[in-house]
Image: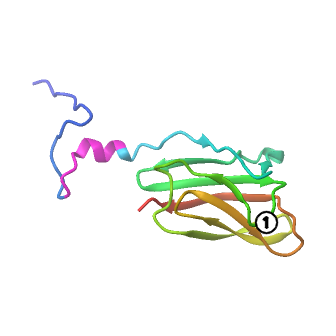
Amino acid sequence: MAITVPVVNTPLSVSGFGKPVADQINALIPTPWQSLTLINGWTAYTSSGRPATAVRRFGELVLLRVSVQGGTSGTNIAQLPVGYRPGYYVDTTVRCGASMGFLNIALDGQFAAYVTGNGDTSLVVGTVVFSTT
């Protein structure tokens, strides 16, 4: 007996929330890394094999990598595309050169670094993970 291959948007069965199971499974497939356009004088800091500033999604989870330099503390670095923006304000501690600071991600997807200490604005963040909901 042949088994029919499911087609996207064709309900195999329905969960308690009314979404087709195939759509839920497809939502878990990660998107490719998308480069972000840097703004306000921020430039790529990719020496020593550091990855470019980029974003990707796994279902409702967003992964953001940041490697930048040359901007001014408190100014926006880039903006996340629609669908990759947090459902709440995100603040996380980051290393800024020899100093510490924090990265703030707003609901509109704009994110900025606030640097403490010597004012070195080279910023390398491994990966920040947050939810879109």
Determine the residue positioned at 61% across, 52% down. 79
Q: Quadrant of residue 25?
A: top left
Q: Which residue is mark 1?
A: 73
* Extreme residue toward the top, this view: 2
Quadrant for the N terminus in the image: top left
Residue at the limit of the structure toward the left, as seen here: 1
Residue depicted at 60% across the width and 54% down the height: 64
Against 122, is 102 above or below? Answer: below
Task: Identify the residue at image location x=55%, y=54%.
Answer: 63
Secondary structure that dominates the magenta span: helix
Q: Looking at this view, is 132 or 20 the one in front?
A: 132
Expressed as whole percent of the image width and height from the top left, the position of residue 55 reads 58, 48
Q: Which residues are magenta?
A: 17-26
**Furthest-bottom residue in view?**
117
Q: Residue 72: horizontal and vertical position, in percent?
A: 81, 61
- Element assignment for label 1: loop
Label 1 sits on what residue type?
A: Ser
- Picture layout, residue 43 above or below residue 124: above
Q: Position of residue 40 (x, y in %)?
A: 76, 52
